[in-house]
Image (cartoon, grey):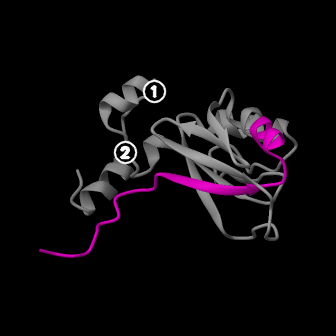
Amino acid sequence: MDPMAKAVGINHVALEVGDLDEAIAFWERIFGDVELRGRSGGMAFIDLGDQFVALAHGRTQPPDSHRHFGVVVDDKEAVRVNVLEAGLPAGSEGGHLRFKDPWGNNIEVVQYRDVQFTKAPEIANRMGIDAAKSERAIGELRAKGLA
């Protein structure tokens, strides 16, 4: 028996922010209505379907330059509009979308259909997203023996 555990995904990402209420408002401004899972001990938890982002009060590091994390969305261009309306650089339509929150956390936004990340059909259905993948994403999954 192999004693090593297999990493199978990411449950959540924790971000340090200066103010929890401002951070929640920022996420709502960029991603629309967010579902707040709860708050506890200087943290707030925003649901992203069957995963979540943890916002932790108290920034202890300088703003990030290259370190980032990706958020998968059903409509990247709708997010781009919100990022631009928030006065942040958002690149050109159809291109790369990465921006910083007010505390310097880099957030990259990717379109669900274009990435390998896959929700189970029943989860995607309950979340109201189209579970279809682009040929490129399917090709990447096939290359790994996952499709």
Closest to the observer: 47 or 124?
47
In magenta stretch: residue 138: no
Mark 1 nearby-residue class (10 Å; few <14, some 14–19, many ≥20): some
The secondary element bearing badge 2 is classed as: loop
User: How many marks can you see?
Assistant: 2
Q: Is residue 100 left or right of residue 133?
A: right
Residue beneath the point at 26% across and 63% down: 144
Residue beneath the point at 41% across and 29% down: 130
The residues tagged by marks 1 and 2 sit, at their Cα atoms, a distance apart of 13 Å
Residue beneath the point at 25% across and 56% down: 142
Closest to the observer: 110 or 33?
33
Q: In the rendering, at what x and y percent does residue 146 appear?
A: 24, 55
The dot on residue 127 is 1
The dot on residue 116 is none
Q: Quadrant of the N terminus?
A: bottom left
Residue 100 in the image: above or below residue 61: above
In magenta stretch: residue 8: yes
Amino acid at the residue labelled 1: Met
The residue range painted magenta reads 1-26
Q: Is residue 120 left or right of residue 94?
A: left
**In this figure, which residue is indicated by the disc labeled 2?**
118
Amino acid at the residue labelled 2: Thr
Q: In the rendering, at what x and y percent does residue 80 appear?
A: 71, 40
Which quadrant holds residue 23?
top right
Q: In the rendering, at what x and y percent does residue 82 appear?
A: 76, 35
Of the residues under marks 1 and 2, which one precedes in the sequence?
2
Q: Which mark is in front, 1 or 2?
A: 1
Which residue extends farthest right? Answer: 87
